[in-house]
Amino acid sequence: MYVGRFVVVGPGIGAYRVSSRSFPNRQVVDRDGALTVGPTPDAPETDNPYIAYNCVREGGDYVVVGNGSQVDPIAEKLDLGYPPRDALAEILLALDYEKDDYDTPRIAGVVGDDEAFIGIVRKDALVVEAVSEPTLVATYEEDDPRAFDLDAETAADAARELYDHEFEHAVCAAAATVGDSVETAFHNGE
C-alpha cells in the first residue's frame, strides 16, 4: 500500500518517513542540529516548493517531526513556551494542507519525554490528538491517527524500522528520541 509520507510518534520517540513516487531522489541530512529532507546530488532540478524542508527539529523540551515547512514554526512556538497541542494546532491550521495537485495533507508530531501529540490538516479536517502509545498518521490512505506497532527504542532503530516498513516507495527516514537528552538519526537506504 502507498501511504505517502508518514509520522509515528509516542512518548519519548518520534519518526518520519518519506515515501514518494514523484520525487524519489531525496535524502535526509543533518544541518545544524535539524534533520533536513532535500534532493540528492543527482536529483533532477525542480521548482516544487514541497520537496525540501526540516523534518526533525528541537523546540523547547520537545522534538517536532513532520512532512514540510510546518516543522520550523511549530518548533519556534515550543521555544516560546506554547503548549505542544496548541503549537501543533495553530500552525497546522495557519499553513493548511499543501496546495499541490493532490491537496497533500500536512502531518506533524510533537514528542516529549513523557508525552506526545500528533496532527494532520487535510482538505476536510484538522485533527490534533494527545497520544499515549506509538501512533501513525500519513498523507494518504492512513490519514486518521491510529495505533502503530513500533518496536524501536533508539532513534537509529526507529529510522531504520520506518524505512523498512512494508508501505511502498520508501525514500528516506528520520527519527528522534527524547529523554535525558535528544538523540536523532536518519536512514537513506543502502
Image (tube, rainbow, N blue to C red):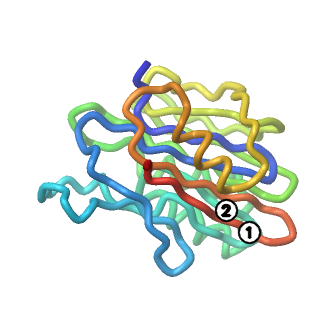
Task: Say whether residue 146 is left or right of residue 35.
Answer: right
Of tags 2 and 1, the one toward the viewer is: 1
Q: Which three-letter amino acid code belongs to the residue tagged 2?
A: Val
Q: Is residue 189 above or below residue 124?
A: below
Which residue appears at 46% of the width and 76% of the height? 31
* Element on which disc 2 rests: strand
Query: Pointer 2 and pointer 1: residues touching (CB < 8 Å)?
Result: yes
Task: Say whether residue 56 is left or right of residue 98.
Answer: right
Q: Which three-letter amino acid code belongs to the residue tagged 1?
A: Val
Q: Position of residue 80 (x, y in %)?
A: 67, 75
On residue 63, which mark appears?
2
Q: Position of residue 182 (x, y in %)?
A: 74, 69
Q: Position of residue 158 (x, y in %)?
A: 66, 47
Q: Position of residue 28 (x, y in %)?
A: 43, 60
Q: Which residue is mark 1?
A: 182
On residue 2, which mark appears?
none
Q: Is residue 30 above or below residue 185?
A: below
Mark 1: give few (<14), some (14-19) or many (20+) Cα within 10 Å: some
- Quadrant in which the N terminus appears: top left
Q: Earlier in the sequence, mark 2 or mark 1?
A: 2
The residues bearing labels 2 and 1 have C-alpha atoms spaced at a distance of 8 Å
Q: Locate residue 4: give its quadrant.
A: top left
